[in-house]
Amino acid sequence: MYALLRIVRGFCGLFAAWHAFGFAMLALNPASLNGRLFPTVLLILTILCGWLFFWLRGTINRMYAKHHGGAPHPALYSAWSL
């Protein structure tokens, strides 16, 4: 169960980081957006995946602590670790 949640967390983190970098490149040329719906939807998905990345860390730690006597998951000491 923990492995599946960590895999989902990894994909969400990679998706959010990849597209955040892409949006940073678009910020250099904002005329390329010209009111299209696709970048807006992609921005919303990027924000949701970024939120899910950090939310899953807390969820995995809570689940692990509940079953292992209050200790946090050993692989999730840092907020950025997968």
Image (cartoon, grey):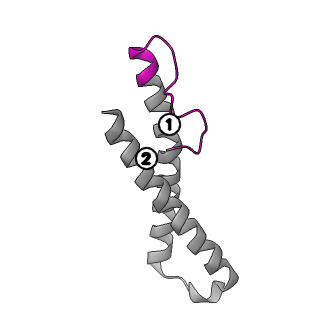
* Disc ID at residue 9: 2
Could you say where residue 41 lies in the image, as x and y percent from the top left?
Answer: 45, 68
Q: Secondary structure at mark 1?
A: helix
* Disc ID at residue 19: none
The quadrant in which residue 20 appears is: bottom right
In the image, the segment drawn in magenta is 63-81
Could you say where residue 47 lies in the image, as x and y percent from the top left?
Answer: 53, 57
Of residues 31 and 57, which is closer to you in this image? 57
Could you say where residue 61 lies in the image, as x and y percent from the top left?
Answer: 48, 27
Compared to residue 44, the image places residue 32 above or below, namely below
Residue flagged by tag 1: what amino acid is it? Arg
| Crowd band around label 2 with a 10 angstrom C-alpha radius: few (<14), some (14–19), many (20+) | many
Of residues 35 and 22, which is closer to you in this image? 22
Q: Residue at x 52, y 23 (%)?
A: 72
Q: Residue at x 32, y 41 (%)?
A: 4
Residue located farthest toward the top when viewing the structure as drawn: 69
Tell me whether circle 2 and circle 1 mark residues in contact (CB < 8 Å): yes
| Crowd band around label 1 with a 10 angstrom C-alpha radius: few (<14), some (14–19), many (20+) | many
Tell whether position 67 is magenta. yes
Quick one: label 2 or label 1, which is nearer the N terminus? 2
Residue located farthest toward the front when viewing the structure as drawn: 74
Residue flagged by tag 2: what amino acid is it? Arg
Q: Residue at x 38, y 15 (%)?
A: 67
Q: Secondary structure at mark 2?
A: helix
Q: Which residue is mark 1?
A: 57
Q: Main secondary structure of the magenta part?
A: loop
Structural distance between the alpha carbons of marks 2 and 1: 8 Å
Compared to residue 81, the image places residue 67 above or below, namely above
- Quadrant housing the N terminus: top left
Give the left or right position of residue 48, taking residue 4 as reference.
right
Compared to residue 70, the image places residue 82 above or below, namely below
Tell whether position 9 is magenta. no
